[in-house]
Amino acid sequence: MKTIKYILAFLLMMAAASSAQATTFSYLKFTTTSGDTLAYSVEDLKITFANGYAYITNADGNSNLALINQANMYFSNGDQEPSTTLIGDVNLDGRVDASDIACVVQIIIGELPAGTFDERDDVNDDGSVDSNDIATLVTIISSSE
């Protein structure tokens, strides 16, 4: 019975990988060391890092930011705060890898109850733990290699 579950889980992962979709964001935000938030539209966004600065060009113009004054950089769709955990790190081991996929699969096939990993098991944040979360993890892992 366990072998069948693992085969089904593997097939589910492969099917999910073929339907992966990327998340799009509207803003690139920086939190400065003084606590201020700077937001830049991602429309026509280009960033170059050189000589301790981030040179930002987008549809609104050009900006230069001293990196030493920046505490955090993240993408956002509005007023949301940056995440303090690594997106996709379901088991909080500091990495996004196959072990995170295994955790989500265990929830999908019923070996672990939903919510075992708080909301981290809903990787794509659509309100359910399913093959789309596996697809999101596969996308994250493959884009980091």
Image (spheres, rainbow, N blue to C red):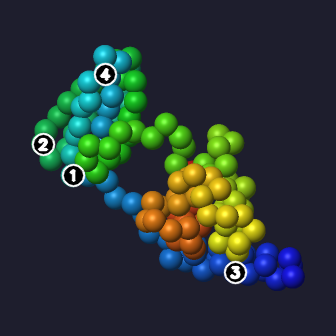
Q: Earlier in the sequence, mark 3 or mark 4?
A: 3
- The label nearer to you, 4 versus 1, is 4
Which of 37/17 is in front?
37
Q: Secondary structure at mark 3?
A: helix
Three-letter amino acid code of the residue under disc 3: Leu
Q: Where is residue 32 drawn, in percent x and y? A: 32, 23
Is 22 situated above or below 69?
below
Q: Which residue is mark 4?
A: 35
Q: Label 2 belongs to which residue? A: 60
Of marks 3 and 1, which one's residue comes earlier in the chain? 3
Q: Is residue 100 left or right of residue 1?
A: left
- Answer with mark 2 or mark 4, whichever residue precedes in sequence: 4
Check residue 43 in the rendering and tell me which mark sits there, or answer none. Answer: 1
Please name the residue shown 70% across and 74% down the image.
109
Task: Say above or below: 111 vs 55.
Answer: below
Please rate how many residues cluster around mark 3, counting C-alpha atoms within 10 Å: few if below 14, some from 14 to 19, many from 20: few
Q: Please, what is the three-letter code of the amino acid marked with disc 4?
A: Gly
Earlier residue among tags 2 and 3 = 3
SS at badge 1: loop
Query: What amino acid is at disc 2?
Result: Asp
